[in-house]
Amino acid sequence: MNRKITLALLFGGKSAEHEVSLLSTQNIIKALDRNKYSLLLIGIDREGRWRIHEDIKSLPTVPNLDFMQGSGESIILVSGEGTAKITSPSGGKIAELDVVFPVLHGPYGEDGSVQGFLKLANIPFIGSGVLASAVGMDKDFTKRLLRDAGISIADFLVFNCSQLSDIKFEDVKAKLGIPFFVKPANLGSSVGVSKVNDAAQFYRAISEAFEYDTKVLIEEFIQGREIECSVLGDYDPVASVPGEVIPKTEFYSYESKYIDENGSILEIPAKLPPDTAEDVRDMAVRVFKILHCHGMARVDFFLKKTGELLVNEINTIPGFTDMSMYPKLWEASGIPLPLLIDRLVEMAINRHERENKLRYSVSRAITL
Ligand SMILES: Nc1ncnc2c1ncn2[C@@H]1O[C@H](COP(=O)(O)OP(=O)(O)O)[C@@H](O)[C@H]1O
Ligand SMILES: [Mg+2]
């Protein structure tokens, strides 16, 4: 494509990670080469309404969340022959777009729902498709698929909200030991995640996790270093140098990720023996392939003192804030953010073209 590519950033969203998405979006906007891209900003508010933000010039270059308060016009996405169109509810055309970058974290964004919507609208989009997004968002399903492929994970139990009366501290303690972790199955940024040492903490942790999801995981505590690795690609993905998160708090909590600037240290690259770093990269690529990811993902590990490497989770739309590991690891691996975005856009367009060439009919029609 020689003309400018119209890139729509889809941000905000109906998720507890709404603010993280805004921070990621601001960072992406700063990095975008305006000679290559026309930018279209589509903000999703907390109620799930989609609005276009046309006033790009007034967008802050410094972190500030005010631009979500503007009451941009509500929009509808319409699939087109070539590019998709955005219209107002009355049908007036507002803009055409080439690619969507869902900069959305958590449910209603990273979980396949938006991906399914964009797929139906026949719009190229960055990142994984419906299946990998949904599986990657759900820690229970991610772990089951990885375990099936022989990848080490922490032992875990799963409960849904109808099983509340069955969840007993003593039973969990007997199965997983203490401390253990309680977390919502489908969320990120450590929202609703607790470390539990006793019964009082346990019941608080369970009720907090169920505020965010109808399914909750309880996991054995893994004593180890937290190593993360970024993956980029489609059918032949590559891994970045690994990084290490060194939380200063008891674990890598929401506060230590986004609120307290000194809450954690990111060590890039992680100080690892070369063989271990290679194992991390190989396993990150394996996980990406097992879960059928596309475009990008960050794979997070625990590295035990014994050298054993366990996969903690995958993030199919990793954070892109200026403190986020995903872009930082690529930067350290020789791919700065503007180039990273170029690659992601290119892959989204190629994948869309490839999928649109698939056959949608059989050669011998059924006669009715
Ligand atoms: N089983 C575990 N053992 C030790 N620490 C854990 C465990 N599970 C989670 N943690 C801590 O909690 C943080 C957040 O948990 P995680 O599963 O990564 O959820 P999120 O998707 O919200 O990031 C981790 O980065 C780690 O510090
Ligand atoms: Mg995590």
Image (cartoon, rainbow, N blue to C red):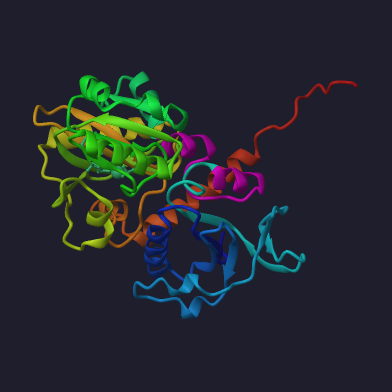
Question: Can you give x and y, in whole percent of width and height, for residue 242 in the image?
Answer: 21, 43
Question: Can you give x and y, in whole percent of width and height, for residue 19 in the image?
Answer: 40, 61
Q: Is residue 5 magenta?
A: no
Q: Which quarter of the rendered image does ligand 1 occupy?
A: top left
Question: Can you give x and y, in whole percent of width and height, for residue 340 in the image?
Answer: 38, 55
Q: Is residue 135 magenta?
A: yes
Question: In this view, which residue lies farthest toward the bottom?
Answer: 58
Identity of the residue drawn at 25% across and 56% down: 255
* Left or right side of 138 for 206: left
- Which quadrant of the figure contains the C terminus? top right
- Which quadrant of the figure contains the N terminus? bottom right
The answer, for residue 290, to whether it is visible in the render is no
Identity of the residue drawn at 49% across and 52% down: 346
The answer, for residue 154, to whether it is visible in the render is yes
* Left or right side of 303 for 114: right
When the figure is inspected, residue 192 is found, relative to residue 293, above or below; the finding is: below
Query: Which region is colored magenta?
Result: 113-138
> Which image quadrant is residue 328 in?
bottom left
